[in-house]
Image (cartoon, rainbow, N blue to C red):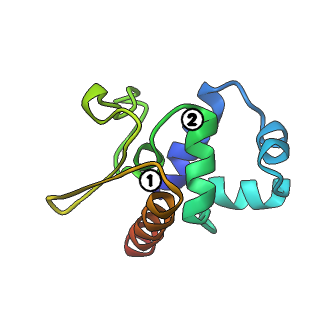
Amino acid sequence: MALASNLRYYRKKSGLTQIELAEKMEISIATLRRWEAGETSPSGAKISELAEIFGVMPEDIVAVGNVEKNPEPSRSSKNSGMLVYESDGTRIELPPTEKGYELFNRLIDDLIKKKS
């Protein structure tokens, strides 16, 4: 699963061990290991938290494809600060407000369900 390998890649790139990342996120090491093994997936809220820790956009974590071949995160100065969701030719930009994060998390959760 792309999410599992992307998560592992960004964790290693950031220099964090599984234990350090689990502690930082206040989750069990077993939960993180299941995410990295592709056995389970984090919620949209946890994906947003991971993205913040790694300094990337949430869509970089759930992106299909090999992030190691394209390690640059998908940031754009034009969209700085905006939450951007793109899928099947549809692009949605949301403001980084409580409602924006709520909707963005739902969109990410739906994307994860589609990919599983």
Residue in the foreground of this view, choosing between 94 and 59: 94
- Side of 100 relative to 87 (left or right): right
- Quadrant housing the C terminus: bottom left
- Side of 22 relative to 99 (left or right): right
* Residue 105 place in picture, x, y as percent: 49, 64
| For residue 18, above or below residue 97 | above
Residue in the foreground of this view, choosing between 21 and 102: 102
How crowded pointer 1 is (Cα within 10 Å; few <14, some 14-19, many 20+) is rated as many
| For residue 81, above or below residue 93 | above
The answer for how far apart the CA atoms under marks 2 and 1 are is: 11 Å
Specify the label residue 83 is tagged with.
none
Quarter where residue 9 is shown: top right
| For residue 85, above or below residue 81 | below
Tell me the kind of residue under disc 2. Tyr
Q: Secondary structure at mark 1?
A: helix
Residue in the foreground of this view, choosing between 102 and 85: 102
Q: Secondary structure at mark 2?
A: helix
For disc 2, the marked residue is 10
The residue lying at 43 percent from left, 67 percent from top is: 103
How crowded pointer 2 is (Cα within 10 Å; few <14, some 14-19, many 20+) is rated as many
The residue lying at 82 percent from left, 59 percent from top is: 30
For disc 1, the marked residue is 62
The residue lying at 50 percent from left, 44 percent from top is: 6
